[in-house]
Image (tube, helix red, strand yellow):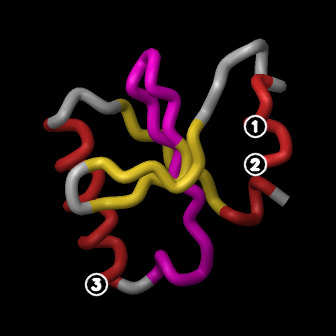
Amino acid sequence: MWGELKSRRLLGHRFRRQHPIGPYIADFAYMKTKLVIEVDGATHSTEQELRHDEKRTQFLQSKGWRVLRVNNDDVY
């Protein structure tokens, strides 16, 4: 996915990879519109992990970010 997002390949938009936002590290962030893309793999399947993801999403949204979650399988 990073291969498509880096170097403005996606319609000229520049994403950052592993971008810190508060206590979290976003997988991909587009600063101009405050969009975060999170790629969730197998480690995002237990109840505890899903609660953590929800807490993370709520934090990011409270700071004005939109969060798009995609599954690893969808990326492949």
* Residue 26 within the magenta-colored segment of the rendering: no
Quickly name the residue at label 1: 6
Would you say 36 lies left or right of 53 here? right
Sooner in the amino-acid sequence: mark 1 or mark 3: 1
Q: Position of residue 46 (x, y in %)?
A: 40, 85
9 vs 68: above or below: above
Q: Position of residue 9 (x, y in %)?
A: 83, 25
**Which residue is found at the position 55% from the left and 45% from the top?**
28
Number of other residues with Cα within 10 Å of mark 1, as a class: few under 14, some 14 to 19, many 20 or more: some
Would you say 47 lies left or right of 75 here? left
**Which residue is found at the position 75% from the left and 14% from the top?**
12
Number of other residues with Cα within 10 Å of mark 3, as a class: few under 14, some 14 to 19, many 20 or more: few
Would you say the residues marked 1 and 2 are in contact, meaning their CB atoms lie under 8 Å apart?
yes
Secondary element type, mark 3: helix
Q: CA distance from mark 1 to mark 2?
A: 6 Å
Using the image, tell me which numbered label, if any, was put on residue 31.
none
Q: Position of residue 8 (x, y in %)?
A: 76, 23
Quickly name the residue at label 3: 48
Q: CA distance from mark 1 to mark 3?
A: 32 Å
Using the image, tell me which numbered label, if any, was put on residue 2.
2
Secondary element type, mark 1: helix
23 vs 8: above or below: below
